Image (cartoon, rainbow, N blue to C red):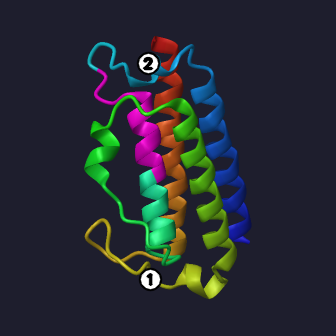
Amino acid sequence: MLTTILTELFERDLNKLKEELDLYENDADLWLKPGRVPNSAGNLALHLCGNLQHFFGAVLGNSGYVRDRDSEFTRTGVPRDEILAEIDTTLSIVKQTLADLSDEDLAALYPIEVFGKPMTTGWFATHLATHLTWHLGQITYHRRMV
């Protein structure tokens, strides 16, 4: 049951992320940091893809993905089409990983400690959905600012 809900939420929000990025007038606007905004929409999108491909794909799905968290926040000028393709890849990985998880898997401890304490896979997967939504809201606001 939880995997079905999470799959629907990730699909909804990753598709919404693509829609938001498509609404920018040009690729250069994705990289602007107006005022005291610390992260561009492009960097937040790269961060979301890296985060989900790492915690779902690499840790749970043994995908072999190697995360470079620093570059998620330092790369600039990545073409929008490349980011959109990365979001599609991310969605595919998240959906496949969730489809492979049983209720027992969700109740088991997540294989690594992320916040300095043990947590279940279901709890952490839910956290990842809210993390996505948090940054999606930031991107929506960023787009309206620029």
Count of numbered circles in the view? 2
Above or below: residue 33 compared with residue 94: above
10 Å neighbourhood of mark 1: few (<14), some, or many (≥20)? some
Going by the image, does 7 lie left or right of 17?
A: right
Name the residue at 39% across, 24% down: 31
Above or below: residue 122 compared with residue 81: below
Res 67 label: none
Name the residue at 52% across, 36% down: 136
Quadrant housing the N terminus = bottom right
Q: Which residue is mark 2?
A: 28
User: Picture coordinates of residue 86 (x, y %)?
Assistant: 54, 48
Q: Which residue is mark 1?
A: 109
Name the residue at 58% across, 34% down: 81
Q: Amino acid at mark 2?
A: Ala
The image quadrant of residue 110 is bottom left
Q: CA distance from mark 2 to mark 1?
A: 42 Å
Dot 2 or dot 1, earlier in sequence: 2
Name the residue at 44% across, 82% down: 109
